[in-house]
Amino acid sequence: IILIAIDFIKIPKYNRMQRFCITLLCVLNTYFAQAEDGYKLWLRYEPVLNQQLSSQYKEITKAIYFGDGDPTLDVAKAEVQNGLPKLLSIPVSISKDINKASLVICTIDKLPASIKNQLTSNLEDQPNGSYIIKTIGKQLVVVAPKSIGVLYGTFHLLRLMQSDESINNLNIIESPKIDLRLLNHWDNLDRTVERGYAGFSLWNWHKLPEVIDQRYIDYARANASIGINGTVLTNVNANALVLTAPYIKKTKAIADAFRPYGLKVYLTARFSAPMEIGGLDTADPLNKDVAAWWEEKAKEIYKEIPDFGGFLVKANSEGQPGPQNFGRTHADGANMLAKALKPFNGVVIWRAFVYSEHDPADRAKQAYSEFVPFDGQFAENVLIQVKNGAIDFQPREPFHPMFGAMPQTPLMMEFQITQEYLGFSTHLVFLPKLFEETLQADTHRKGPNSTVAKVIDGSLHSKRISGIAGVSNIGTNINWTGHPFAQANWYGFGRLAWDPNMGSKEIAKEWLKATFSSDPDFVNPMSELLISSRETVVKYMTPLGLHHIMDANHHYGPGPWIKNMPRPDWTSVYYHKADKEGIGFNRSSTGSNATAQYAPELAKVFNDPKATPSELLLWFHHLPWSYKLENDRTLWDNIGITYQEGVNEVREMTTTWEQMSPFVDHERHQLVKSLLSIQLNEAIWWKNACMSYFKQFSELPFPAEMEKPDKSLEYYMSLKFPFAPGIKPKWD
């Protein structure tokens, strides 16, 4: 209709056909200009449509003074020069005179006394990366003691503009609550990614060190925008080759590219490296030759990369070598590496994800049993990295009992951003809600309000160093994460790493505004959808505390029937223990007594099925199918009803997304719509497969509220997926 109407508008010098073609080209250009592939992430800098705010932004940014002096300040300047013209459709005007500038972006030492004296804090005693955004008279200043703080503050200011927030009369003082804010890449040297669902690894080791892909720079920029300050480049199932001279040179090239963005590099250290690449006949941490080898290796690395972060180590877990192979302890191994790194201010991050095939009682107890007795015996530059729950990144777990139980040792949180157990990159799941649930859980270790967040930020036990890590969901896919909404999990992790007390709903709104639209008619319903999405997935996968009932190896789809595996704790039946008597894992005082690893206040709650929250009921208790819940329905009925609720909620998500089409470009809208179709089909698959399997034991009819399975249990058990993405590599 638009084409026909415009066609009749007379344009001098052009005939009707020429006018039609010009109009068609204009419309097509507009259409494709709006098409998006997701590569820009949350840094799109779309024009501000609110005219009042746009005028305010233009007034404040009409003349900008930039500090200079190092590559990080240059990056901050480039970000403003890139962002403002897109947001405001005006060029950036640079002022050489700081006193005449309307916006000042620099380090504090560059400020004249007239401005500096009006700062409420100089931040000298605050963590690295702290910054101030403050209105002083007619000027807005973005300042920090160090250049990385200036960069973080610059991104913060641009985020306010992207979110349609007023920047009049600001007085923002920001400091990161956690020191080490890391992404853990489970990337292999052959560019496969363990538990990766967004393509191959970003790191093209074959072309390094000569070729620095622009994607490395864009990756570093995205991380800096949310305050992430470190990257572990390689898989925790480590390959010793990464510690050889050629790979250290390649790592140096990445480190050099990342440095202006405040992003340090770390590597995973294979504990047996002295034997595999060092020519030694042992890797015993108490052997002098082994210790000397690691000390020389540290010197070699720091000669090339002076700001190298340190080593992440997976030891004596799932076949990985470690100090126990030589009759030594985790403390022996970690402290030996820590001594090698200490002269260079490097850290050792030692993973607590350990469980032995020789201890069949309860896998959930093993990390606590192996590490808590060594509290206070680790070197000061060692952090113990603990998964959020005691099993393995399940859709829901209670917080790990180690949090708060090692007051003399820094414990570092490990979240999984990649969705290994939550539908890969085909399901929409807003993980910051899961992260928030864990962080705000109360350990009761030092009385009420002894939250997990306070453990990992170091404030509960006055720790010198603190850390948090997220297992990356990033790959070579054009939109970085496979699912457009999986970007929110990377973003949300970064925001919570900066401030673990931030609310997930605030994060959702920030991300939605920057990534799609700031229109309230879009942001409000979509933020509600994001916040509820994690609970939806729990409902259709593992309701009421069920866990680890995914199919084997690849963890794709339901597999509650899995039982014939090399180890019992790799099976599903080990965890749900369904039989004719009932279902669930008894971890109470009458069972494995895993509840005793929590503070007494929590143990008392978890030991009583009536007091245990319903969402964790089957995590801690094996209960009869006829057991009545608070709604006076049986356990069996509640399981089936909850599975159905999950399916229904995916349908509601699909309906909501359909209504969002006016606010979203066609390409991304269609992609998410297609992915929601997959999610719905798989939610139904989960419901049908699990309920059909458990019905064998309950011998009860499906609840009336539940849609009945349309295929047999034998059909669901016959499904095989040998090429599901993200499977562990076969090489050793």
Image (cartoon, grey):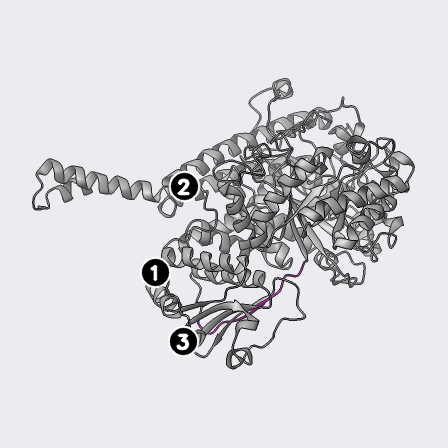
Q: Which secondary structure dominates the residues rendered in magenta?
A: loop
Left or right: 199 with respect to 519? right
Badge count: 3
Asked whether, in this view, residue 24 is left or right of residue 321, the answer is left
Q: Quadrant of the N terminus?
A: top left
> Of the residues under marks 1 and 2, which one precedes in the sequence?
1
Task: Relative to 228, say whether 650 is above or below.
Answer: above
In this view, the residue in front, 415 or 1, is 415
Relative image position of residue 344 (x, y in whole percent): 75, 53
Residue 705 shows in this picture: no
* Coordinates of residue 187 in the picture (x, y in percent): 63, 36
Q: Which residues are magenta?
A: 168-178
User: What distance separates the C-alpha of mark 2 from that of mark 3?
Assistant: 50 Å
Q: Which residue is mark 2?
A: 658
Query: Is 725 left or right of 270, judged from the image as shown?
Result: left
- Report the disc number at residue 100: 3
- Please, what secondary structure does the residue beneath circle 3 have? helix
| Mark before the other along the chain sequence, 2 or 3 | 3
CA separation, marks 1 and 3? 18 Å
Q: CA distance from mark 1 to mark 2?
A: 37 Å
Residue 496 among those drawn in magenta: no
Residue 229 percent location from the top left of the image: 62, 53
The answer to whether one can see residue 516 in this image is yes
Residue flagged by tag 3: what amino acid is it? Lys
Q: Which residue type carries mark 1?
A: Pro
Residue beneath label 1, please? 91
Q: Nearer the viewer, residue 362 or 32?
A: 32
Q: Amino acid at mark 2?
A: Glu
